[in-house]
Image (cartoon, helix red, strand yellow):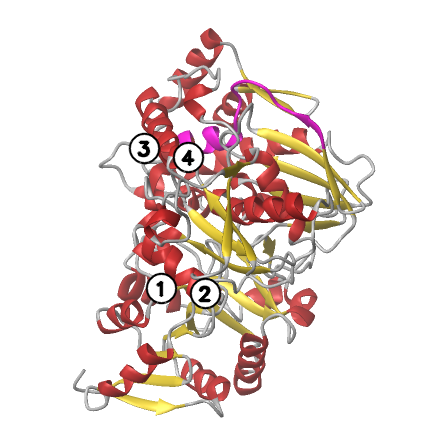
């Protein structure tokens, strides 16, 4: 009989589950949206019965004898917190809706154990502070003993910023902000002003659009003035000033029927305001960090800003986990439960891998042989990297579903669509024929870790696609499909240790073309989560412009008839 620890992300949005064993090993972590194929999975329980059953089966849980400790990523329910609801930026109705979802999810956390026969009565649930869960998740993926750990998100139990010291792998909160004041809320409002929807997670669109705009000081300065920064703590301006500033900014909002590029200056100005405020926070957190900064919380997904930190701010090294937002808190909750049981305050160091989710079952893969006659199906177990490199060099677009799924919002080679970055029209082809998304949206370059300095300025590792760097001018011209409008790229770095298949593929592509860079984007279409099953992969394959599909060791290619 073994004790496992089930961590649940219980924010009401971006639910996820994580499983840690009795020795503190992270066995599994996956967002619920992948399993149910519902973007952000608003209001869906993170211990969704079929998903939890599948996850436990994959980690070898014995339903007859093993036991499960349940932990959540919130210590208190939002509706019980003395937080003032403000309607100057986002509608109060959105906040009320989220609070209702949050209350229901946290109240019923663990109920699925009854349905699965793991418990005979509602289990006792271990509830942990939201920002502490963020900090434990982020620190667990950072292989350093000493660092500043900064959490910045939309909302925690008391405020939207927490500062922790990591010393000897032990976390201690140095301070937290209190009351309203949130960079996450500011960016969500910016997303709405640009004509996108934060509830669908469309902050990405703002970051991409910002590269096409010019910073307008009157917009930037008004946005900066919305928030006051006091020794790193954030607080919104008083109600009267907030209302006046918000009104002055709303005149620049993009009307629903206006072209997207009408919002480019607004996006650029909002990103600049975010950077100015984040700089003020970071200036207050560097003491005693040995040059190391760990970032967590949803704002840690702002890769455009992240790429400017190391070397410019008082930090030499930046660590961002693969899932810094609320889905990642499932890991923090599970680890905190294990730490309590093991009676240790030291945060374990996790292996440097994001590949923590589900894998295709052998039965599902074997059924793909039935596609013969409809498509060309071949076994590439001996030469998969060579064959895919060959197809990419021929200009083909290839979907990949191999091994365990990545945990977090970025596709990192196991659930990716890959292409040749050299043709100038490749970005347009994929956006139009595959993704069905706005034509300005950029794609990521994948490089071998040892090559980064040759291609990028301010070179640094980026295994989870967490930072955006500036291309070296002479190199950018070789890979136009992965160079954004401002001369940057949100890169993924791979090594033989952490991503052997992708590392070999990039090397093989470089040998064929002289350019060791591959275009990578998530295996999905706009508005849908990254694919979860072979059936999901096939649906995108047959209904889009993808030319070939790799599922485990099978290569599936469209025939002329298909």
Among numbered discs 1 and 2, the one appearing first in the sequence: 2
Residue 397 picture location, percent across and down: 36, 75
Packing grade of label 1 (10 A; few <14, some 14-19, many >=20) is many
Badge nearest the viewer, 4 or 2: 4
Specify the label residue 405 is tagged with: 2
Measured Cα–Cα span from mark 1 to mark 2: 8 Å
Looking at the picture, does residue 77 appear above or below residue 325? above
Circles 1 and 2: CB atoms closer than 8 Å: yes
Query: Separation of disc 3 and disc 1 at Cα?
Result: 35 Å
Q: Which residue is mark 1?
A: 532
Can you give x and y, in whole percent of width and height, for residue 139 in the image? 67, 48
Q: Nearer the viewer, mark 1 or mark 4?
A: 4
The residue beneath circle 4 is 106
C-alpha gap between disc 3 and disc 2: 37 Å
Q: Position of residue 219 (x, y in %)?
A: 47, 26
Q: Position of residue 295 (x, y in %)?
A: 63, 43
Q: Earlier in the sequence, mark 3 or mark 4?
A: 4
What residue sits 23% from the left and 86% below the top?
370
Residue that mark 3 sits on: 254
Looking at marks 3 and 1 on the same chain, the residue that comes earlier in the sequence is marked by 3
């Amino acid at each position: 009989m073994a004790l496992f620890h089930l961590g649940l992300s219980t924010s009401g949005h971006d639910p996820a589950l994580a499983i840690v064993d009795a020795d503190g090993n992270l066995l599994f972590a996956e967002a619920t949206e992948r399993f149910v194929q519902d973007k952000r999975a608003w209001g869906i329980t993170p211990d969704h019965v079929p998903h939890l059953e599948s996850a436990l089966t994959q980690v070898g849980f014995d339903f007859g004898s093993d036991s499960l400790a349940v932990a959540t990523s919130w210590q208190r329910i939002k509706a019980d917190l003395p937080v003032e609801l403000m309607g100057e930026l986002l509608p109060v109705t959105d906040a009320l809706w989220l609070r209702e979802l949050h209350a229901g999810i946290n109240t019923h956390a663990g109920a699925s154990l009854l349905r699965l026969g793991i418990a005979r009565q509602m289990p006792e649930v271990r509830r942990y502070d939201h920002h502490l869960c963020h900090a434990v998740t982020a620190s667990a993926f950072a292989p350093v003993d000493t660092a500043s750990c900064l959490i910045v998100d939309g909302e925690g139990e008391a405020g939207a910023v927490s500062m922790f010291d990591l010393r000897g792998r032990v976390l201690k909160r140095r301070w937290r902000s209190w009351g309203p004041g949130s960079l996450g809320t500011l960016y969500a409002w910016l997303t709405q002003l640009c004509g996108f929807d934060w509830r669908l997670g469309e902050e990405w669109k703002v970051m991409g659009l910002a590269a096409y705009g010019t910073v307008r000081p009157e917009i930037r300065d008004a946005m900066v003035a919305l928030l006051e920064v006091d020794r790193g703590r954030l607080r919104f301006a008083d109600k009267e000033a907030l209302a006046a500033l918000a009104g002055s900014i709303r005149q620049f909002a993009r009307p629903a029927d206006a072209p997207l590029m009408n919002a480019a200056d607004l996006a650029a100005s909002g990103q600049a305001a975010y950077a100015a405020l984040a700089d003020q926070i970071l200036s207050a957190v560097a003491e005693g960090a040995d040059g190391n900064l760990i970032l967590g919380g949803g704002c840690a997904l702002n890769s455009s800003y992240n790429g400017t930190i190391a070397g410019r701010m008082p930090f030499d090294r930046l660590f961002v986990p693969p899932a810094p937002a609320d889905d990642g808190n499932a890991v923090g909750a599970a680890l905190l439960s294990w730490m309590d049981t093991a009676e240790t305050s030291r945060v374990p160091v996790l292996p440097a891998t994001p590949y923590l989710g589900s894998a295709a079952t052998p039965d599902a893969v074997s059924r793909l042989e039935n596609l013969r006659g409809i498509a060309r199906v071949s076994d590439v177990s001996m030469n998969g990297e060579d064959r895919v490199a060959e197809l990419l060099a021929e200009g083909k677009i290839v979907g990949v579903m191999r091994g365990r799924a990545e945990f977090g919002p970025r596709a990192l080679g196991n659930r990716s669509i890959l292409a040749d970055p050299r043709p100038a029209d490749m970005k347009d082809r994929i956006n139009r024929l595959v993704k069905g998304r706005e034509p300005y949206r950029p794609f990521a370059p994948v490089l071998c870790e040892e090559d980064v300095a040759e291609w990028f300025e301010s070179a640094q590792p980026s295994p989870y696609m967490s930072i955006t760097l500036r291309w070296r001018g002479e190199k950018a011209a070789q890979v136009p499909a992965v160079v954004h409008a401002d001369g940057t790229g949100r890169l993924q770095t791979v090594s033989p240790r952490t991503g052997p298949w992708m590392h070999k593929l990039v090397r093989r592509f470089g040998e064929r073309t002289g350019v060791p860079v591959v275009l990578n984007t998530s295996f999905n279409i706009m508005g849908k989560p990254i694919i979860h099953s072979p059936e999901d992969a096939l649906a995108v394959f047959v209904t889009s412009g993808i030319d070939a599909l790799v599922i485990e060791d099978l290569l599936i290619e469209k025939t002329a008839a298909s």
